[in-house]
Amino acid sequence: MKNNTSINKPGTSPNVQVLAKLVLRKWSLLAIVSGLVLAAVAAVITIWVWEPAYDAKQFVQIRQNREFIALDNQPNKKMDPKRYLAPISSEPLLRELLSEQAIIERRPSIQIEDLQKMVRYEPIGGELYAIICRDHDPELAAIVSGMATNELLNEINEDRQQSLENLRQKIDKKILTAQAKVNTLSNKMRDLNAARMLSEPGDTTQADPSGAIRLNRESKLDTTKDSLEMMEISLTQKKLSLEQAEEKFDEVVILPVVNSSPILAAIDEQIRTLKQDRAGLIRLGSGHPTVVNINDRLVRAQQNRIGERAALMETTKEQWIASTQSRLTQEIKLLEFNISRVKSGIVSDQSEIAQLANEFKETNDLDFEILQLGWERDRAAENLSYWNKELSNVSGKQLADFDVTLFASAGDIGVLTPIKPVEEYPYRLLVIACVPAFFLPFALAFLWEYKLQRVSHPEQIQDHISSNLLGEVADLPTRSQSPSRMSSRRITKQLRLYEESVDNLSAIMMHIAEKKPMVFSVTSASSNEGKTTLSSQLAISSARSNFGRTLLIDADLRSPSIHRLFDLPMKLGLADALSGETTDIGLDDIICNTQIENLDVLAAGKLKSSPRRYFSGPLWHQLLELVRENYDYIVIDTPPVLAASESLAISKECDQTLMCILRDVSVTDSVKRAYERLTAADVNVVGYAFSGVPQYEYAIKYGSYEYNMS
């Protein structure tokens, strides 16, 4: 059955993680060496083309002028030094530098864009800032830094003069406004005094000349209003309690009243008597008529008690709710009456307070207004005096909202020519150049593997072919171990694990055989995918399993190799038997015995013409029928499907065909095309084997079960 849970979906790109692992397995050593070489070349080129840059610095201190801020009447104003330093890289300021002879001599082709890239400012800490010019020419950097600072200071001085002039104009306006206010208040006071002298004297017996009675009444009125507010809140709460009287019914409150009812007491006494009678007759048994009668009466009495208790609860609940509602209604009426009475008192008090206020106003307004105007005139005169004093302070001073102090790099000799470059060594450029150069081989290997789409996991195949995975075969340890170490315990363990993996595959092949003798071929999509090694080991496993006599046929006539694996002489073989040139060749002449019991080998023989001609005639079918009579299992090593056309003809005569897929070597597209060719030719592809699995991965996935041979 096809597995739907796979790494790659049809028509999608391979999994990035799988490709990354494949690249690390196959290309890690070459990529690391190539990356180191490319990184070294990139480092050499970077150092060769690198040109050191120098920073020439001019330091300035920008401090907020508290005296100016106080005169400007803006105590919360905060200084923004960036506003004064921003013009350092502006085009109008830097354009003045293009006409300087010292700069032209150092670099005649310099442009305004070059200066904008060279000049900047940086905060040093606190109120200190650095005006920096960076260039590969240290002397030019020092010249530009000093001249740019001077141009900036000139613009700042102009700004300072403008700020001082604006402040003077602002103070003048304040003085004019204050003088006008003093004159206006003086005129008003003169008019009120004249009106007071011409008016007739009033009644000196005033009701409340000091206003003490009115203040006392106002205090009492506030207290009364607070009491009214509390009463209204209490009224609202009681109305809410009246509406929710039934919802707030508390069953626990009336439960003692219900339990003390005479009716329930009589029923409880009846139940207690019946239980005592039943206890005295318990010896008669539960089925006795008297006991049954008592039980029935006891049940009826208990049910009667439940009904009576429910009725009493309902009656008591209604009485409790009615009593609560009646009490709350009386309390609400009393509160409403009190609220009405208090509101009437408040209206009366407010009327009396208004009358007292009118009497006080009529007798005291004129004197109070004259006194108030006198206070306002005194304050206006003080304000006028303050601004006149500030005007005298500003006159003759060069104030601004900030102070700029210039600090030379060394005393008063100007900007020093920098000696050390900004970077002693181009570490950042080296990292930028070397890191991509080092990882470039990995990226190329990744793209190469992405294009090839090699098979690194069996699930990658299940989305492209409908055949099943029959088994995974561990990798041969001899590929990475020298023959001198083959006797070690580790190599022996790895060999046994490899043999066990092949034995598992062989057992599956034998059990799915529909008939005996069985002929199955082992093929692959392309060459060098391990089909010859797998077919040989399958034949050895079949012979050692006592399944019967086994014959291994080397049908790969183009590139035969089985005779070398078994150290057999290259004499007459399959090609000689199928050529038809000699008719007296028997099986004994072409089949060789091996040192393994029950295993014989039919070598490829000497190829004399096109292999396709050998397998397209009737001799191939006759040969298979002949070996079926003498062997129980025949394993055929066929050529690759995509490289040799005779592979389809060979496999079509076999009972089953096993495809060999080698990890990290087989390509997904090639496997898919080979499978489509086999199925189109009506070949019975029973499944595929995934070989080349690393020993540790196979042991983790399937386990390793060691055995001790005594």
Image (spheres, rainbow, N blue to C red):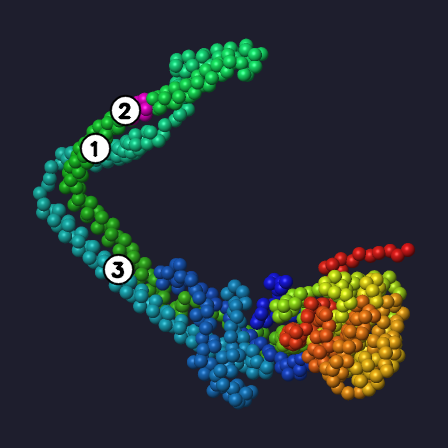
Q: Residues within 10 Å of mark 3 (few under 14, many from 20)?
A: many
Q: Position of residue 577 (x, y in %)?
A: 82, 81
Kind of residue sitting beneath label 3: Ala
The secondary element bearing badge 3 is classed as helix
The secondary element bearing badge 1 is classed as helix
Which of the two labelled residues, at mark 2 and mark 3, occupies the earlier sequence position? 3
Task: Tell me if I can see residue 517 in this picture.
Answer: yes
Residue 326: give its label.
2
The secondary element bearing badge 2 is classed as helix
Kind of residue sitting beneath label 2: Ser
Residue 320 in the magenta stretch? The answer is yes
Of labels 2 and 3, the one closer to you: 2
* Quadrant containing the C terminus in the rendered view: bottom right
What residue would you read off at disc 1? Answer: 343
Front residue of 17 and 668: 668
258 left or right of 656? Answer: left
509 left or right of 124? Answer: right
Residue interval drawn in magenta: 318-326
Residue 514 picture quarter: bottom right
Residue 254 picture quarter: top left
> Disc 1 and disc 3: Cα gap in Å?
50 Å
Kind of residue sitting beneath label 1: Lys
Q: Position of residue 528 (x, y in %)?
A: 75, 76
Which of the two labelled residues, at mark 2 and mark 1, occupies the earlier sequence position? 2
Q: Residue at x 43, y 70 (%)?
A: 83
Q: Position of residue 646 (x, y in %)?
A: 72, 80
Q: Residue at x 78, y 67 (%)?
A: 517
Q: Residue at x 85, y 81 (%)?
A: 585
What residue would you read off at disc 3? Answer: 178
Q: Position of residue 613 (x, y in %)?
A: 74, 84
Residue 551: give its label.
none
